[in-house]
């Protein structure tokens, strides 16, 4: 099995329902035969409508989060089961914004990953170091701990539904992209960790995305690296032309 190449968008907290429907409609119109998997991650409130809209499109749909509890008295939360019921197929988990602003630690993320998988969702699991950690040369130990803390306990069977996204925090929304060499080094390291844990074949099949100021100008150079299988795109995913140019670069 050759590993899946992918371009995924993460809309974050952007777009009203109407704006989101307009963007998804344009993407559906323009992206009919992509040469890679295409996923858009939207706010919860868009999911059901956009899932319906994308029914006969190759574009897949992701939630940007799910609850760490199964169900019940958790006001304002959205469970993995609810996400699945909208027609979404993926869930983005472990994003640095959620780790930093909503205090999602390894244990919380472990619960979320398990619930997402148990409900038949695929997980795009984000990892990455902050600037100070990179400057101290600690990026490898940081991402290793993030994997060990939340996803390396999974079974080999469960692992098949995990896509990794390396998102150095210092590169997110800053215009400061990791160089292709920095990203490739990290992706190769991540793949080696997956190989140690799940074996060489599983590592070879694991899709590892790069995220952090990836745009229509730098995508081709990043995607040319052997261990960079695609991108998780923030800002540039909010503009159809830019996102489509990134898909074309993959
Ligand atoms: P930007 O592409 O805006 O830097 O965001 C990347 C990201 O966080 C995707 O999840």
Image (cartoon, rainbow, N blue to C red):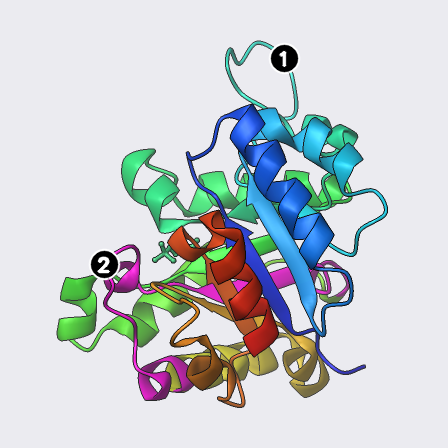
Q: Does the residue labelled 2 lie within 8 Å of ligand 1?
A: yes
Residue drawn at x 59%, y 82% as measured from the top left: 195
Question: Tag on residue 174?
Answer: 2
Q: Can residue 124 be seen in this view?
A: yes
Image coordinates for residue 113, horizontal then vertical, percent: 59, 46
Q: Where is residue 150 in the image (x, y as percent from the top left)?
A: 50, 53
Horizontally, residue 180 falls left or right of residue 15, namely left
Task: From the viewer's side, name the closer residue of 145 and 213.
Answer: 213
* In-front residue for pair 68/244: 244
Q: Name the residue under label 1.
A: 72
Quarter in which the N terminus is drawn: bottom right
| Rendering quadrant holding ligand 1 | bottom left
Q: Is mark 2 on a helix, strand or loop?
A: loop
Q: Give the range drawn in magenta.
A: 157-184
Indicate left or right for 100 with 219 as reference. left
| Residue 45 % position (x, y) | 58, 24
- The answer to the question of whether label 1 and label 2 lie on touching residues, with beta carbons closer than 8 A, is no
Separation (CA) of disc 1 from disc 2: 38 Å
Residue 169 part of the magenta-drawn span: yes
């Amino acid at each position: 099995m050759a590993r899946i190449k992918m371009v995924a968008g993460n809309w974050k907290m952007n777009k009203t329902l109407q704006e989101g429907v307009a963007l998804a409609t344009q993407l559906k119109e323009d992206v009919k035969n992509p040469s890679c998997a295409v996923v858009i991650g939207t706010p919860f409130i868009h999911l059901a409508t956009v899932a319906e809209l994308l029914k006969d499109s190759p574009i897949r749909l992701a939630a940007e989060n799910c609850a760490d509890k199964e169900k019940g008295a958790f006001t304002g939360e959205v469970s993995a089961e609810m996400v699945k019921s909208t027609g979404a197929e993926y869930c983005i988990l472990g994003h640095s914004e959620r780790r930093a602003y909503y205090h999602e630690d390894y244990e919380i993320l472990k619960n979320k990953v398990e619930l997402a998988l148990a409900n038949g969702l695929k997980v795009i699991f984000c990892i990455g170091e902050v600037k100070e950690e990179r400057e101290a040369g600690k990026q490898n130990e940081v991402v290793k701990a993030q994997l060990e803390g939340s996803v390396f306990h999974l079974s080999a069977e469960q692992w098949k539904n995990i896509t990794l996204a390396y998102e150095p925090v210092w590169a997110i929304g800053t215009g400061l992209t990791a160089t292709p060499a920095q990203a490739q080094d990290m992706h190769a390291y991540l793949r080696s960790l997956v190989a140690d844990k799940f074996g060489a074949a599983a590592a070879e099949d694991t899709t590892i995305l790069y995220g952090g100021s990836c745009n229509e100008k730098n995508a081709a150079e990043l995607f040319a690296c052997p261990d960079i299988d695609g991108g998780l795109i923030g800002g540039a995913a909010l503009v159809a032309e830019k996102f489509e140019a990134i898909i074309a670069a993959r």
